[in-house]
Amino acid sequence: MSNKKKIHYRYLKGEKFMYFLVVLLIIAIPTVNIFTKALLSKTIIETENIQDKINKQENINEGLSMQKDELVSMENIQKVASEYGLSYRSDNIVKVTYDEEINSEN
């Protein structure tokens, strides 16, 4: 008969900690990777939503600017003036300019 001795393996000092650390890293790295990708995806979606709001507001601003230009047009001014019994005479128009030399002396 053969006599077999059981070999009892003893862990070296810190070896259990090293195994625990390796297992922890094997679990933590993919988890953190998935979490950061999800966070990045959420940020990209929020950025796109904000960009859509900006584009809509720019379109609204452009439309309002066109309405303002339409209301300020000479044809509209003459129409409103005639409704109130006013007349347009070009000799009554005075052009006001800003002269820097005069103001710099004061």
Image (spheres, rainbow, N blue to C red):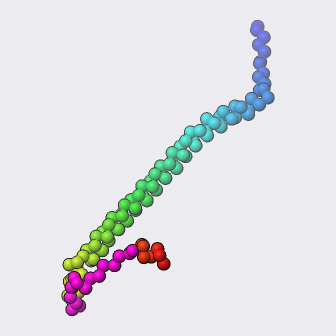
Instruction: Inspect this view and state whether residue 80 appears.
Output: no
Q: Is residue 43 left or right of residue 57?
A: right
The x and y percentages for residue 26 are: 61, 35
- Please name the residue shown 61% across and 40% down the image: 28
In this view, 16 is above or below 102: above
Figure label count:
0
Residue 86 magenta-highlighted: yes
| Residue at image coords 53%, 43% | 34
Q: Main secondary structure of the magenta part?
A: loop
Q: Is residue 18 magenta?
A: no
User: Which residue in the rendered view is the most extreme toward the bottom?
Assistant: 85
Foreground pick, 51 / 27: 51
Q: Which span of residues is magenta-colored?
A: 84-99
Quarter-of-image position of residue 63: bottom left
Q: Position of residue 91 (x, y in %)?
A: 22, 84
Residue at the far top: name it.
Answer: 1
Q: Is residue 54 left or right of residue 33?
A: left
Q: Residue at x 48, y 78 (%)?
A: 106
Instruction: Indicate left or right for 6 with 64 as reference.
Output: right
Seen in the picture, residue 22 relative to 64 is either above or below; the reply is above
> Residue 75 location, x and y as percent?
20, 78
The quadrant of the picture occupied by the N terminus is top right
**Which of 101 and 61 lies nearest the eye of the viewer?**
101
The picture places residue 74, in percent across and down from the top left corner, at 23, 78
Location of residue 58 with respect to 85 vertically, above or below = above
Residue closer to the observer: 89 or 63: 89
Q: Quadrant of residue 88?
A: bottom left
9 or 71: nearer the viewer: 71
